[in-house]
């Protein structure tokens, strides 16, 4: 055994990377450069692990370190360009999300994931945007893949709930939002979605009860209030418009 041999840690890191075990590989790569700061392959592997996990800034630092040791290293030069590209995709995606250009965000995340295949953060952002675009099966598939690897991922639980919410499965959606909040009590998006879902369900049920009781004026008001909760929930709102139309028909008789 040679616990102070940098190349051994570097080789094990390379093996773990081939197995897709980037977090474990990162630890070995970091140990290899702690033992030998001039170990170029160690810096490259550390950078690759960081990049695969979506930490492009840390990856850039590793590739720069490799270039300090060997400024002609073509692999380090290319990997630095890749990491810089990921940083740019992140920046563009953040701006486009604010502008609600969700298709552009999906495009940017797909490009970033080519270099960062193990980044849950990029996958979640892509899944959330797919859900907001109404592409629920794709969004659910991405979120479910993450939950299979990490059942406590609050962001993935939120996206699963969001898909169900927009497909008018509100009770199931609330369960996922509550679970997400259990894992991350300060999850703002899950908190807002949970509040909207509960309010929408309650208003709709109150409206239905008023309708059955023959109180059409109250039913109309309740359905109208429900429609103001979330204009983006097209499926539930379609049913509410239908219910309100039925109320109008009853009132005009």
Image (cartoon, rainbow, N blue to C red):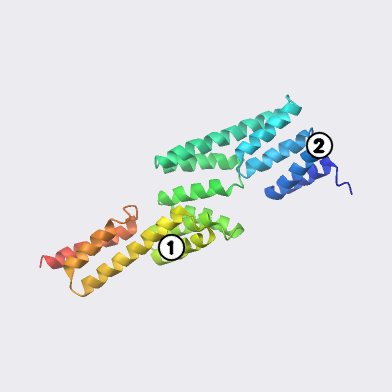
Q: Nearer the viewer, residue 116 or 64?
A: 64
Location of residue 32 in the rendering, given as x and y in whole percent from the top left corner: 79, 41
Q: Crowding near pointer 1: few (<14 within 10 Å), some, many (20+)?
A: many
Q: Label 2's element?
A: loop
| Label 1 secondary element | helix
Q: Crowdedness of circle 2 by 10 Å Cα count: few (<14), some, many (20+)?
A: some
Position of residue 215 relative to residue 124, above or below, is below
Return the residue at label 2.
36
**Would residue 70 appear left or right of 197 to someone viewing this image?**
right
Residue found 54% across the figure and 58% down from its top = 144
Of the numbered discs 2 and 1, the one sitting upstream in the chain is: 2
In the image, taking residue 37 as reference, residue 155 lies left or right, namely: left
| Residue matched to label 1 | 173
Q: Residue furthest bottom?
A: 213
Q: Residue at x 54, y 60 (%)?
A: 183
Residue lying farthest front? 186
* Image quarter in which the C terminus is found: bottom left
Q: Is residue 87 left or right of residue 169?
A: right
Between 48 and 154, the residue placed more toward the observer is 154
Up/down of 57 relative to 195, above or below: above
Farthest top residue? Answer: 72
Location of residue 236 in the rendering, given as x and y in whole percent from the top left corner: 32, 60
Q: CA distance from mark 2 to mark 1?
A: 51 Å
- Residue at 33 percent across and 58 percent down: it is 235
Identify the residue at the far left of this view: 253
State which quadrant residue 7 falls in.
Answer: top right
In the rendering, at what x and y percent does residue 229 appear? Answer: 31, 56
Along the line of sight, which residue is nearer the eye, 14 or 187? 187
Q: Is residue 130 above or below residue 95?
A: below
Residue at 68% over, 40% down: 48
State the count of labels: 2
């Amino acid at each position: 055994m040679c616990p102070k041999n940098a190349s051994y840690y570097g080789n094990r890191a390379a093996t773990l990377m081939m197995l897709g075990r980037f977090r474990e590989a990162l630890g070995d790569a970091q140990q290899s450069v702690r033992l030998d700061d001039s170990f170029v392959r160690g810096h490259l592997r550390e950078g690759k692990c960081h990049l695969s996990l979506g930490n492009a800034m840390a990856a850039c630092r590793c590739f720069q370190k490799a270039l300090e040791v060997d400024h002609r290293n073509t692999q380090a030069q290319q990997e630095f360009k890749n990491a810089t590209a990921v940083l740019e995709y992140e920046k563009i995606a953040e701006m486009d999300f604010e502008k609600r250009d969700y298709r552009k965000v999906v495009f940017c995340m797909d490009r970033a994931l080519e270099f960062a295949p193990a980044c849950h953060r990029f996958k979640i952002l892509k899944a959330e945007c797919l859900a907001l675009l109404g592409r629920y099966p794709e969004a659910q598939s991405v979120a479910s893949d993450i939950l299979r690897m990490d059942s406590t991922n609050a962001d993935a639980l939120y996206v699963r709930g969001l898909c169900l919410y927009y497909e008018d499965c509100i009770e199931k959606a609330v369960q996922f939002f509550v679970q997400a909040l259990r894992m991350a009590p300060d999850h703002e998006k899950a908190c807002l979605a949970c509040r909207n879902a509960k309010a929408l369900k309650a208003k709709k049920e109150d409206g239905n009860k008023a309708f059955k009781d023959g109180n059409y004026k109250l039913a109309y008001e309740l359905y109208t209030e429900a429609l103001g909760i979330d204009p983006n929930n097209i499926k539930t709102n379609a049913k509410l418009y239908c219910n309100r139309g039925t109320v109008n028909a009853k009132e005009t008789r």
